[in-house]
Image (cartoon, rainbow, N blue to C red):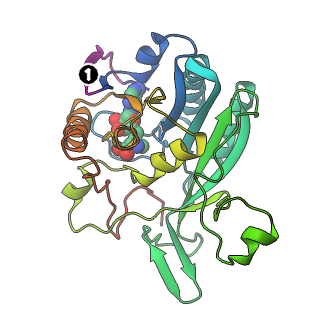
Amino acid sequence: MAQEKVRARREALGRHALIRGDAMNVVRRMADRSVDVVVTSPPYNIGLAYRSYEDRLAERDYIDWMSVICAQIARVLKADGSFFLNIAGSSSQPWLPFELITRLRERFVLQNHIVWIKSIAIEETTYGHFKPVNSSRFVNHNHEHVFHLTHKGDVRVQRLAAGVPFTDKTNITRRRHAIDRRCRGNTWFIPYETIRHRKEKYLHPAPFPVALPTACLTLHGYDENTVLLDPFMGTGTSLVAAEQLGVRGIGIDIDTRYVCVARRRLRAALANPGSDPGPAMDIDDDRADDPP
Ligand SMILES: C[S@@+](CC[C@H](N)C(=O)[O-])C[C@H]1O[C@@H](n2cnc3c(N)ncnc32)[C@H](O)[C@@H]1O
């Protein structure tokens, strides 16, 4: 929710649009059925220290606010479009993502529920990073949700393009696959890069890795006419992914400084294709803020 009225400011960068403004007002002015893919990570309402957004509303207000924005997203999303909503709960608000997604049943079909695994322990080895929760009641939060919402649940997805090679190559002929590729399923292991200083994650409390919007776009499918919208773009990670894939991006954030960061990242991506390493998290990932 915007704490104060913000006048929207729009700029073009390459084929992309960066907009400093309140997502609610900006999306409201966009044309019906004008967007192919929405990839976004809104504020989670878990008390993160954003610069200008107060991330701690009453749960009911938060869900009301998000459902109004999502109604606008439903309006601008094309009939065969995909809305990837990345969100997570916390130990103190474990129901929130589920309550939100249940409310969104009014507007969307939940076509796929993808679990973004940020860290996993396989036998004795841990891969990826997470913020340790100091608690005798709660285990660490190592995953987030990516809800793939569509109008009717019938959008064709690019399972193989987003997929992986077979481990057992005999499956290719045995199962009559044309190529060495299979669906990766609904668990995506996408770790943060390790960083040494918070500056490296653009002084933002909650960027996601470029690989996440890239995976969403790849699953939906894209070409040079595809339009991606991120109404809560933060540091512009989705737009960097859009640029790398040759997709047109529209990014909105309410905070001037985050829009500056997004501008810098997008300029770097335009100047040196493939140059952005993606925002990284250090071992002390401060995305969650759980009570001890
Ligand atoms: C979870 S962060 C997004 C991070 C982004 N995915 C990235 O990789 O940097 C949520 C963002 O929503 C922005 N925000 C909060 N309220 C907003 C509003 N009403 N309109 C637009 N942006 C808003 C915050 O400033 C914050 O940058």
Q: Position of residue 3 (x, y in %)?
A: 36, 24
Q: Position of residue 88 (x, y in %)?
A: 55, 50
Please tell me in which quarter of the rendered image ligand 1 is found: top left
Q: Position of residue 186 (x, y in %)?
A: 66, 57
Q: Residues within 10 Å of mark 1 (few under 14, many from 20)?
A: few
State the residue position of label 1. Answer: 12
- Residue in the image at 53% along x and 46% along y: 218
The amino acid marked with disc number 1 is Ala
Q: Is residue 86 one of those drawn in magenta?
A: no
Q: Answer yes or no: disc 1 within 8 Å of ligand 1.
A: no
- The quadrant in which residue 254 appears is top left
- Residue in the image at 52% along x and 17% along y: 34
Point out the residue furthest to the bottom here. Answer: 124
Q: Position of residue 261 (x, y in %)?
A: 22, 40
- Residue in the image at 57% along x and 39% along y: 221
Of 200 and 250, which appears nearest the observer? 250
- The quadrant in which residue 7 appears is top left
Question: Looking at the picture, does residue 54 appear above or below residue 7?
Answer: below
In the rendered image, is residue 143 in sight? yes
Of 63 and 82, which appears nearest the observer? 82
In the rendered image, is residue 100 in sight? no
Question: Looking at the picture, does residue 175 appear above or below residue 52?
Answer: below
Q: Is residue 11 one of those drawn in magenta?
A: yes
Q: Which residues are magenta?
A: 3-14
Of 68 and 176, which appears nearest the observer? 176
Could you say whether the residue bearing mark 1 is in a helix, strand or loop? strand
* Residue 171 left/right relative to 79: right
- The quadrant in which residue 182 appears is bottom right
Question: Looking at the picture, does residue 163 appear above or below residue 68?
Answer: below
